Amino acid sequence: MGRKILLITTDQQRYDTLGCNGGTISRTPVLDALATAGHRYERAHPQSVVCMPSRSTILTGQHPSTHGVWMNGVPLPVTAPSVAEVLHRAGYRTALIGKPHFEPFLDPFARFAENGFVSPDLRRAGGPGIHRGFEHFETATHGAMGPLHYARWIATEHPEAAGMFYRVIDGGLEVNAAGGGATGAPQVHDNPIPREWYHTDWVADRTIAWLGDLDADDDWFCWLSFPDPHHPWDPPVSEMSRVDWRDVPLPPGYSERAADRERILDAKPRHWRAWYDGRLVSNYEAPLAWVPASLTPDQVREVNARNAVEVELIDEAIGRVLRAVAERGWADDLDVVFTTDHGELQGDFGLLFKGPYHVDGLMRLPLIWRPAPSQGVAPSVVSRPVGLVDLAPTLCGIAGVEVPTWMEGRPLPVDDADADRRGFERVLTEWDSVLFGVDVHVRTITRDGWVCSAYLPGTSHDGTEGELYDLADDPLQQVNRWDDPACAALKGDLLADLWDHQPERSAVWGRVEAPV
Amino acid sequence: MTFGSVRHSRRIAAPADRVWALAGDPARLHEWFPGIVTCVVEGASRTITLASGLTLPEEILVHDDVSRRFQYRVTTEFFRYHRGTLDVVDLGDGTCLVSYAVDADPRTMALVIAGAAAAGLDALAALMETPTADEGSA
């Protein structure tokens, strides 16, 4: 028997939402305990700050430029390489339960495999079978919508709950800007659904059920993929008393005075302020009808409170899954990797949601690897930069299989000395979007305590703009030093390193086939 | 702005007349457009049924065999505006350029329909660029 692998991802979760990372709003004892017993990474970055490219990176171990999913709405080819395929071939039982999002959700033509698994009459020829290396797929997203297993379960078992969720997409198929709750914040909603019917618990329940069907001597890899704490912020009302939004402090990255926010934004490339003012929405992930400048301090508090409730529910759901693993007698052989696909601005700079903004709110991710206790690994805190591109090779390492040459990452370092020995110096993040006549292209490198973003020519940029932040002196990335003469040499070095290490652009540059 | 306009095009290595014979026949859309299960034409009306089960009523606006242009609109009230336009342009060298443009409000549907149409153009090319029995034996 080998080591069992539980990869847990959330959607759109900030680094600072976990207690082990200094978070103070949500209580996350289960994840904190995993961090204490394992490796906690302080500088883990995604290779894209939106879902589909980032999840494709987790699956393939490749940068977006290589796997070709360069923005949301570009499907990952079904034939793309997959770490699950590698593990399955090595004898692992494999499952993905929760949110996959390697293919677009908006799919009225029912063209994409992920949207067909729930319904036999929608399945592709031959049925799902082994899909992307997963022998078992159960799908969910941010509510009871779409042709996904969770939505079907709600419709079948609890039809009265189908309309309880916030509608993420509005009647015009845009990301909904409608507000709710006590403050009218966008994507906030009072959801009367009983907790046990909410998707967080459903994903955990289904994972426990799948584990329960395995043989005791099976080796297994399960990707447990929670849709939360991605907006909408509509956790069950029954849980809202956990965090009173009135008691939630404003995040350090949120300046309460509008003049301060605007001064900070004006020092960044122009699309920042243009979005804030409502003059430009460059990407589908931001509600078209919402103007960030209208965001109030109380709305920031309420969003953060609800986000914290969702994070607590996830933590408790993970605890249930871990107990189920222990009851099967697998606890000593279980590796747990916990992370998310990207972050959330959540009030930083007076903004919510995500977009072409390569700052810590979106890029600094929670990442914990708790190796199997049977391995006797010493706990550590790793400060060197790593990426989600390193997850797939790490999973291969856990399983004892050779890392395929098509993977671009490397097994995660177990401490800083290991990172230095193996040259974990930099992590790269990229953004490309083309949407209704607006295109934005950004390439970012994080190394030596600096984050440097270069903007390629697009409809909002002429190719000379950029951002440069000193993460030690300016942890909130409020002082853009791109044009600071004192940083010219440093900037030059970082840019040279950035361009030297760009992944080769894939010949398969996917087509945008839906907005998300 | 909630209006979107998206166009995809593809050069196909087959004569324009032969491509138009299929692509320009409104009753044969399901033979090359992915995710369309059935296609029923009655006069200037066409009804398509998608693989998701959704049925869309359409009005044929232009069916021009001379310029090889086909234009239609989805008439369901969900669309504040919709036009779908297919053109087959003879490039004079035995090949043609096929373009499929979608103008829609809500704009999201322009992306979704055009995305499927682009895959349809790939399928159309695959069908048209496969030698016929006669061509294969020539």
Image (tube, rainbow, N blue to C red):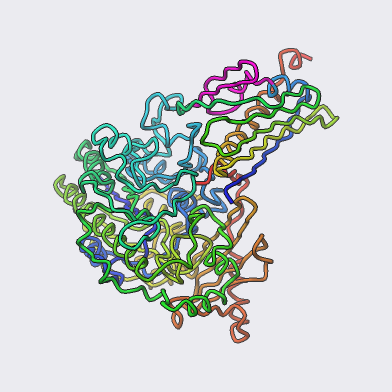
Pick the residue in front: A63 or B27.
B27
Magenta region includes residue B29: yes
Residue A5 lies, in percent from the top left, at 30, 49
A293 lies above or below A475: above
Q: Residue at x 47, y 42 (%)?
A: A103
Q: Quadrant of residue A233?
A: bottom left
Q: Residue at x 20, y 52 (%)?
A: A322
Which residue extends farthest right?
Answer: B92
Residue A469 lies, in percent from the top left, at 51, 77
Pick the residue in front: B91 or B79.
B79
Image side of residue A208 versus residue A183, left or right: left
Magenta stretch in the rendered image: B25-50
Pick the residue in front: A270 or B123.
A270
Image side of residue A354 versus residue B131, left or right: left
Locate the N terminus of chain A by quadrant.
top left
A455 lies above or below A111: below
Which residue extends farthest left?
Answer: A327
Pick the residue in front: A158 or A215.
A158
Magenta region includes residue B42: yes
Image side of residue A286 versus residue A201, left or right: right
